[in-house]
Structures are given as structure tokens and as C-alpha cells.
Amino acid sequence: MTALHSDILRLIILGGGGHAKVLHALLQACGHPVVGICDPQLSAEGARLWRGIPVLGGDEALECLDPQVYGLINGVGQMPRQNTRRRLYELWREKGFSFPPLVHPFAWISEDTHLSDGVQVMAGAVLQSECVIGMNTIVNTRASVDHDCRIGAHVHIAPGVTLCGGINVAEHAYIGAGATVIQGISIGSDAIVGAGVTCVRNVKPGSVLLGTAMRLKLTD
Ligand SMILES: CC(C)(COP(=O)(O)OP(=O)(O)OC[C@H]1O[C@@H](n2cnc3c(N)ncnc32)[C@H](O)[C@@H]1OP(=O)(O)O)[C@@H](O)C(=O)NCCC(=O)NCCS
């Protein structure tokens, strides 16, 4: 499965950081050309090209473009307690643009799993049967989402996460790299499950769950 109606839309990436690089590689792997990138910092620096793609300007460059012709790729990554990615998505959706779901050719997604607008599924991810993935959510590199999971909008499932079956993850939650969540758990909105945590109880909205912290051993 590759990008859906990006076959007919001309694609523009928003943001030129690390997440955008991964998406650019995904689009290359799918054979989808990118016609431009908008990034205020690149624009301020006077850059003309980013990875061979024309820099169109800051986000204001989108104002004169037709949403029926151009589709957007949200290249801003999602870090804990940050809202930039969500704000950007909501702003340009309101102005009529769509963000085609993207799936790396080396991801595997069950036919009966639903991906909403703007979902990004990176290399090595697996999404099993009857999952629903909300808009603008990232399922990052090598994450595993098992059957019947309901993932809300603006969630980040970071690299290497394992979600067992029947898990609910509410809007804008963050599941840190390598975390494991056992079956049937609910993770509240805006909650953060720290990297490497094993989560065996429900997580309240807005709370932060940490595992056993690493300790430095002092030697002579
Ligand atoms: C949970 C998290 C958001 C906390 O960040 P923070 O609020 O800045 O916390 P700090 O780094 O200041 O650490 C505070 C304390 O919590 C501990 N801690 C932080 N994250 C932890 C984790 N995941 N597991 C266990 N302990 C953790 C720290 O060791 C520190 O303990 P100390 O006070 O005894 O030294 C962050 O550590 C995390 O796990 N982020 C996810 C990163 C990720 O998945 N990146 C993927 C990018 S694609």
C-alpha cells in the first residue's frame, strides 16, 4: 500500500528537519515526486534547494496555491509536550488542504485497518487487523500495533513501540521509543509514556509514565 490520492495531488513538504528527511526518503521509496518544501528557516537563510527540492518559501508560500492541486506532507516531527505539528496540520486543513496518508513500502498494514488523513507509517511498522489510526498520527519506524487498537488524532507512536491488542490511545498522547503496552490498556489524551516503559495499567490524561531510570556506575 502506498500513498492514496497523492497519486493525483502535487506534494509539498512542510518543515525541513529530521522527520522531513525520513518522509522524503519514504516518498522516494514509493516513487512519489515532491514539487517543493516550505520552511521558514530555510527561506530566511536564502536556501533555494533542500535535498534537491525547490524551497518555495515559508508557510505563507501556500496561500496562493490551490488545495485541489497540491497535497501537504507534515514534515514537523512530534516531540513530547510540543504542539507545532498539530497546529500546522489544523491550520492548513482549515484552509482546505489535505495531507494524504503515507505508508512506507516496507510497512505492513492489514486490509481492514483504517488510516485517517495525514497518518504517516514508517519503514518496518506493522499494523494488524481492525485498527483505526486517527488523523495526523505518526506510527514510526519498526513500531508494532496489534489487532483492534484505536489510536486517536495527533498521536506519536515512536520507533520500536509495541502496542498489544485492543489498546485505546487518546488524542495527542505520546508513546516513547521502545515502550511496550499490554493488551486492553487505555492511554489518556496528552499522556506521555516514557521511552522503554512497560505499561500494564491505564494511564490518566496528561500524566507522564516513567520506567526504571538508568543509573551510572561510578568507577575509579
Ligand atoms: C518521558 C520523557 C518525556 C521525560 O522527559 P523530561 O521531562 O525532559 O525528563 P528528564 O529527562 O528531565 O528526566 C527526569 C527524570 O526522569 C528520568 N527519566 C526520563 N525519562 C525516563 C524514562 N523513559 N524511563 C525512566 N526514567 C526516565 C530521568 O532519568 C530523570 O531522573 P533523575 O531525576 O533521577 O535523574 C522522556 O525522557 C522520554 O522518554 N521521551 C521519549 C523520547 C522518544 O521516544 N523519542 C523518540 C523520537 S522519534
Image: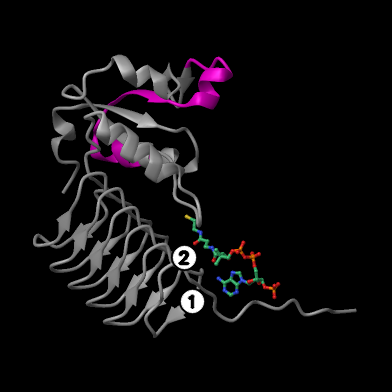
Colouring chosen for the image of the structure: one colour
Q: Is residue 116 visible?
A: yes
Q: Is residue 218 left or right of residue 108?
A: right
Label 2 crowd (10 A; few <14 / some 14-19 / many >=20): many
Q: Is residue 54 visible?
A: no
Residue 176's label in the rendered image is 2
Q: Judging from the image, what secondary structure is the residue with disc 1 in?
A: loop
Q: Give how far across and how far down residue 127 sits, in percent.
A: 23, 64
Quarter containing ligand 1? bottom right
- Tag 1 residue: 197
Q: Give how far across and how far down residue 164 sits, in percent.
A: 29, 77
Q: Is residue 144 left or right of residue 20?
A: left
Q: Are marks 2 and 1 in contact (CB under 8 Å)?
A: yes
Q: Is residue 66 above or below residue 193?
A: above
Label 1 crowd (10 A; few <14 / some 14-19 / many >=20): many
Q: Is residue 99 above or below residue 180?
A: above
Q: Is residue 67 left or right of residue 144?
A: left
The reply to whether the residue tagged 2 has its Cβ within 8 angstroms of ligand 1 is yes
131 or 25, which lies in front? 131
Which amino acid type is shown beneath numbered disc 2? Gly
Q: Is residue 182 above or below residue 91?
A: below
Q: Residue at x 39, y 85 (%)?
A: 200
Which amino acid type is shown beneath numbered disc 1? Val
Q: Picture quarter containing residue 107?
A: bottom left
Q: Judging from the image, what secondary structure is the residue with disc 2 in?
A: loop
Disc 2/disc 1 C-alpha distance (Å): 8 Å
